[in-house]
Image: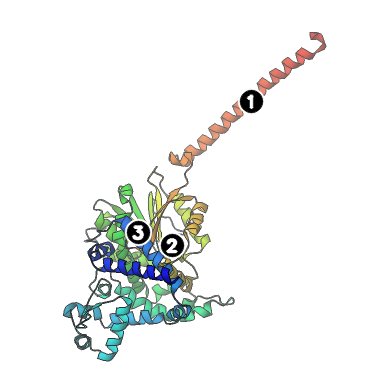
Amino acid sequence: MENELEHLNWNIKHALSQLEGPLSEELNACLEVSPTSLNSSPLVYQKLLETVQVLDKLLVTLTPPNMTLMDGIFAFTNSKVLLSATEYALADHVQKLQPCSISELAQASGLHEQGLSQIVRYLREMGYFSQDPETGRLSNNRLSDLLRKDHWTGWINWVDFFPREYYDLLSRLPDQLRSDQPKTATELFYNTDKPIYQYLAETGRAAGFHKVTGTGSVVEAPGLLADYPWDEVKSETVVDIGAGAGDFIRSYLEKYPDATAAAFELPSTAEILRQRFPADDPLTGRIVSITGGDFFQDPLPKSSVYLLRWILHNWGDEDCVKLLRRLRETIVIKSGVSRVLIVESVLFDGRLGRGARYADIRMLVRCRNKERTLEEYRRLAEEAGWQLNRVITPRGCLTQVMELRPTVSIMMERNWSLGESCMGIIAFLALSIHLDRQLQGNWNRFDTAIDAVHSPSSK
């Protein structure tokens, strides 16, 4: 084993020297996914993810158990240190002063120098900030840039939200898990019997929640719009079911100047959408409709293309099938075009599935629901009359796009109306009866001829 570890160490050190040296510019381009920069090859990006997955498995295999246990016990420290960094705008101050000393950063942020130096040391080991080994002066890097208030992603909204509210909600997770506990951790924490989204709306928390989910839409839009073949549906109105505050719709319409879209949301959220797209907004004219309602009961907008982002993980299997069946009944059938795009964090093993596992526990405490594996999504789709056609992991996204196509009969493929379908069935039955009568007559005549041959008078 010693020789194998020496060989492994040499290869890893060599790869690091290349990636931090002559390949650093290419690596940065591969990792940078933004509305103005998407330079990496999708194939190279996938190879990068495969490498991360293998290295994570190697790390899990080699790390002593006590170290792994310690990481799990103190994992909450990561989120609280990140929260401290955004609370005092450390990345913003560094951006103005860089390169800067700890003393200069402490003065700019109004923090104790010793405590700040400990926080910065922790952040550096997590990968945030660059520090000159000789002078100790700090600069931002591609990771600490994400903590800036002016960064296009708005990731700071997640840092400000989850380590606060969800940190508190998770304190009730052990209580929720008891077999005799009917409430979720969220309901226990807020002391409410109301469904979570109703509670958020009634207590003024909905806007903050949609701000966070909207950030996810903005962050994933460049990769999603680049790596899914939207040209296949560019002439159709894309209906966003559960559109939130409309952040994806805005990105989609800005990317494709001739495209149209529609939104379906709860009535209270639909009102937020209308405010986000006022009459003087140049994109408003390409939004066909904003409909408020219950997607389990109220009529859905008719279209040949539907989008569901972060919707199914809120619901149990039975409700998911019900919604997908409603879409199957509503969708306008156009050969080669009609589809539903499901965007969710699919559960995978290893490092690439970590984001989905985080989300899985969030869904458990929020509404006693879950993220799913690809096979689980396939079963839900097939039960509702769809087939899983392809799966895409866009660059820079924590989610997968699952494209569902209708399981189409010949009649539906030809887009027959109900009346035409019924007439076709009646005609088929009539023809069957006619043929049956003809065959029966032929058999009767055949039997008569046979009887004549064997009768006494014929001998």
Q: Position of residue 184 (x, y in %)?
A: 50, 75
Q: Quadrant of the N terminus?
A: bottom left
Figure label count:
3
Q: Which residue is drawn at the image coordinates 31% and 57% (left, top)?
A: 44
Q: Quadrant of the C terminus?
A: top right
The residue carrying mark 2 is 346
Q: Quadrant of residue 307?
A: bottom left
Q: Can you tell which mark lies on residue 437?
A: 1
The residue carrying mark 3 is 47
**Of the two numbered discs 3 and 1 in the rendering, the one whose residue sits closer to the viewer:** 3
Q: Is residue 39 left or right of residue 238?
A: left
Q: Secondary structure at mark 3?
A: helix
Relative to the observer, which residue lies in front, 380 or 347? 347
Q: Is residue 301 left or right of residue 254?
A: right
Q: Is residue 210 left or right of residue 424?
A: left
Q: Is there CB contact under 8 Å for labels 3 and 1?
A: no
Q: Secondary structure at mark 2?
A: loop
Report whether residue 305 is seen. yes
Relative to the observer, which residue lies in front, 169 or 282? 169
- Amino acid type at mark 3: Lys
The mark nearer the N terminus, 3 or 2, is: 3
Above or below residue 330? Residue 441 is: above
Q: Position of residue 20 (x, y in %)?
A: 26, 69
The mark nearer the N terminus, 3 or 1, is: 3
- Amino acid type at mark 1: Arg
- Amino acid type at mark 2: Val
Q: Quadrant of residue 105?
A: bottom left
Crowd around label 3: few <14 · some 14–19 · many ≥20 (10 Å): few
